[in-house]
Image: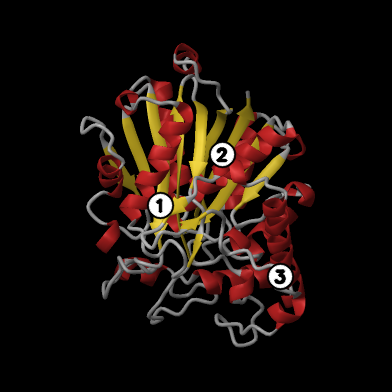
Amino acid sequence: MRDAVIVGAVRTPVGRRNGGLVGVHPVDLSAHALRALAERLALDPRDVDDVVWGCVSQVGDQSWNVARGAVLAAGWPESVPGTTLDRQCGSSQQAIHFAAAAVISGQSDLVVAGGVESMSRVPMGSSIGDGNAFGDQVRARYRDHEGFAADDPVPFSQGVGAEMMATRWGFDRTRLDEYALASHEKAAAAQDAGLIDAEIAPVATADGGKVTSDEGVRRDTSLAKLGELKTPFKADGVVTAGSASQISDGAAALAVTTSEWAAAHGLRPLARIHTAVVAADDPVIMLTAPIPATAKALRRAGLGIEEIGAYEVNEAFAPVPLAWLAETEADPARLNPRGGAIALGHPLGGSGARIMTTLLHHMRDNGIRYGLQTMCEGGGMANATIVEAL
């Protein structure tokens, strides 16, 4: 029976908004990840059956199928196709799932999965413009939902959803700020120990500089500084910019194939894609679906949460991983061990692939057999992926 294995995973550094990567077009940023992947694996791009690429705001610099543009910009053969998908924040995690399905089914032998987002160049929400993204019937269906006003010009706000989660699970401001501080501390420690270096392909910039590490890590932050931030989503709220993911730029790429193809081409798999699921939950709160997605993945895998050696739960907002911990009773010490999106940043369409790249390197470095990744997504969805080290 055919399987799906990941033989390579690489990412760019994550740039801060208007930071070191602002001058790099998202097609070129994607191409950089593709080239780095091929170089590290000594991969012949002619063998790639497809490139499946996640990107959320597909407008402006990110329009016209970023995946195909990236293939051409990377200098890969014109015969290599590419397609771009949008499952909101989980877009590139979904790209990995689609790649796995393609190779397991026999439709492809080698698929490159990944994603990109340049939030500096294409601001979040740009693709909505002045349109009605949800339509009148969706708005009507949820007009009586707690915390949602039918005439709200920006309905289904994730920030409001984060406040609703904090209320439901009883997280106060201090708890969220403590979590945010810990994310920065873990990320800084990982950088200082050189743990991140192997997963990053530094990006040269037009001014002759080079971005070599994630720019969002705030080494000088503290509970006192976090406590000074305003609560933009609710007057008496608890969620701030400090306990939310950062607006960022970045890309990542992974090579997905079968064990048989990998062996035939001298490639050693990092991990097998053991289980891949998607789930959905309340679309107004929007952020809770990682909980049922995790339960679904564990059930299908026949594993208990205690058997998973590392968890990556995207830090869209601090209440998300905290609620996930509360509901799964997972070991907090295994959660986002190298920091999460609060410290590293969240380049929407690229985050799923970035997180998987970080997870795989952490598993390899620490002899971990099983890892789990999940992330909340716009519309109240979540992907969950369990990988098994080989």
Q: Is residue 285 left or right of residue 249?
A: right
What whole-number distance in Å separates the C-alpha atoms at marks 3 and 2?
A: 26 Å
State the residue position of label 1. Answer: 116
Q: Is residue 309 left or right of residue 277?
A: right
Callout 2 secondary element: strand
Query: Residue 53 at x, y = what percent?
Result: 36, 44
Amino acid carrying mark 3 in the image? Leu
Image quadrant in which the C terminus is located:
top right
Task: Please tell me which of labels 2 and 1 falls first in the chain.
Answer: 1
Q: Is residue 115 visible?
A: yes
Which circle, 3 or 1, is nearer the viewer?
1
State the residue position of label 3. Answer: 176
Q: Tell me if label 3 and label 2 are in contact, CB under 8 Å.
A: no
Going 25% across and 41% down the picture, which residue do you hit? 72
Query: Residue 235 at x, y = what percent?
Result: 60, 88
Location of residue 310 with respect to 344 vertically, above or below: above
Residue neighbourhood size for the residue with mark 2, other residues' Cα within 10 Å, grouped as few (<14), some (14–19), many (≥20): many
Quarter location, residue 186: bottom right
Res 385 label: 2
Q: Is residue 54 visible?
A: no
Amino acid carrying mark 1 in the image? Val
